[in-house]
Image (cartoon, rainbow, N blue to C red):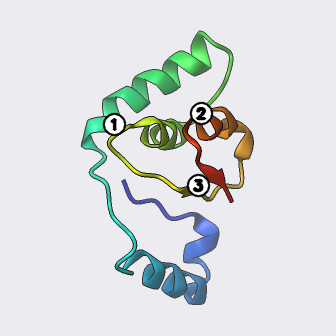
Amino acid sequence: MKLFAPRLVRRPDRLVRFDRLLKSPRVFFVDDADFRADAYDLAVESSTNLGRAISMVDMFCRLLVDDVNTRVDALLTTNSVDFRDVCERNGVTIL
């Protein structure tokens, strides 16, 4: 799942820097196929039954952080509230 915020694509200089970062050897792309259905189901359940609206993309990120087979050291987000619990549980730093 690759997503770019509208603000990012409107600024080619920032998009170029972001592209360079993503193509660095330290970045590993994770196949999202294993997480997609669960992220969808959990996002719907969270919004409808638990009264906590979390987008499918944010739910995907939560699942990724919680996955024991995926190493996540840090999460860069502007919405730390939706990730605080899962990041604390897994020792992931929120940037």
| Callout in the foreground (1, 3) | 3
Label 3 is placed on what type of residue?
Leu
13 relative to 80 in the view: left or right: left
Reading the image, the residue beneath label 2 is: 89
Give residue 38's position: percent from left, percent from top: 37, 27
Residue at 55% across / 75% down in the picture? 9
15 in relation to 69, above or below: below
Determine the secondary structure under disc 3: strand
CA separation in Å, label 3 and label 2? 13 Å
Instruction: Specify the quadrant that holds the C terminus.
Output: bottom right
Reading the image, the residue beneath label 3 is: 75
Q: Are marks 1 and 3 in contact (CB under 8 Å)?
A: no
Reading the image, the residue beneath label 1 is: 36
| Callout in the foreground (2, 1) | 2
CA separation in Å, label 1 and label 3? 19 Å
Residue at 72% across / 46% down in the picture? 80
